[in-house]
Amino acid sequence: MVNQHLIQQFGKRIRQLRTERKLSQEALAELTGFHRTYIGMVERGERNISLSNIGVFAKVFEMSVSELFDFEKMRGER
């Protein structure tokens, strides 16, 4: 399913950005205001998050929403 693939790719991207910045899920939760379990669910592709929450992630990672969706920048992905 295309939607599930997109949700999973987005989760992988969030995990990549978090780990590159040496942040724990707890630290990212504190920065975003989301619960740690929600961060985990997003990273595992279990949550179809809202556009406003995507904006929160983009702000925390200091990038545009379009940069956040640049899945080609993920290691080992194309």
Image (cartoon, rainbow, N blue to C red):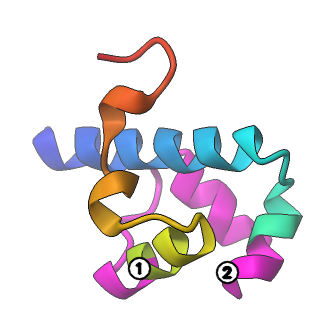
Residue shown at 30% from the left, 80% from the top: 51
Q: Main secondary structure of the magenta part?
A: helix
Which of these two is toward me, 6 or 67?
Answer: 67
Graded by Cα atoms within 10 Å as few (under 14), some (14 to 19) or many (20 or more), the crowding at tag 2 reads some
**Residue 34 visible in image:** no
Q: Which residue is mark 1?
A: 55
Picture coordinates of residue 67, whole percent (x, y): 35, 54
Picture coordinates of residue 70, whole percent (x, y): 31, 43
Which of these two is toward me, 68 or 25?
Answer: 68
Q: Which residue is the extreme one toward the top?
A: 76
Query: Could you tell me which secondary element the residue under label 1 belongs to?
Result: helix
The span shown in magenta is 29-53
Residue shown at 82% from the left, 80% from the top: 30
Residue 22: quarter of image: top right
> What amino acid type should be assigned to the residue bearing mark 1?
Gly
Q: Is residue 15 above or below residue 26?
A: above
**Residue 75 visible in image:** yes
Task: Classify residue 36 as left or right of residue 8.
Answer: right
Q: Which residue is mark 2?
A: 32
Picture coordinates of residue 53, whole percent (x, y): 45, 81
Q: Is residue 29 above or below residue 52?
A: above
Which of these two is toward me, 48 or 76?
Answer: 76
Which of these two is toward me, 78 or 6?
Answer: 78
Residue shown at 37% from the left, 87% from the top: 52
Quadrant of the drawing holding the C terminus: top left
Quadrant of the drawing holding the N terminus: top left
Picture coordinates of residue 16, whole percent (x, y): 61, 38
- Marks 1 and 2 close (CB-CB < 8 Å): no
Graded by Cα atoms within 10 Å as few (under 14), some (14 to 19) or many (20 or more), the crowding at tag 1 reads some
Task: Classify residue 75 as left or right of residue 78.
Answer: right
Alpha carbon separation for disc pair 1 and 2: 10 Å
Q: Does the magenta segment cover residue 38?
A: yes
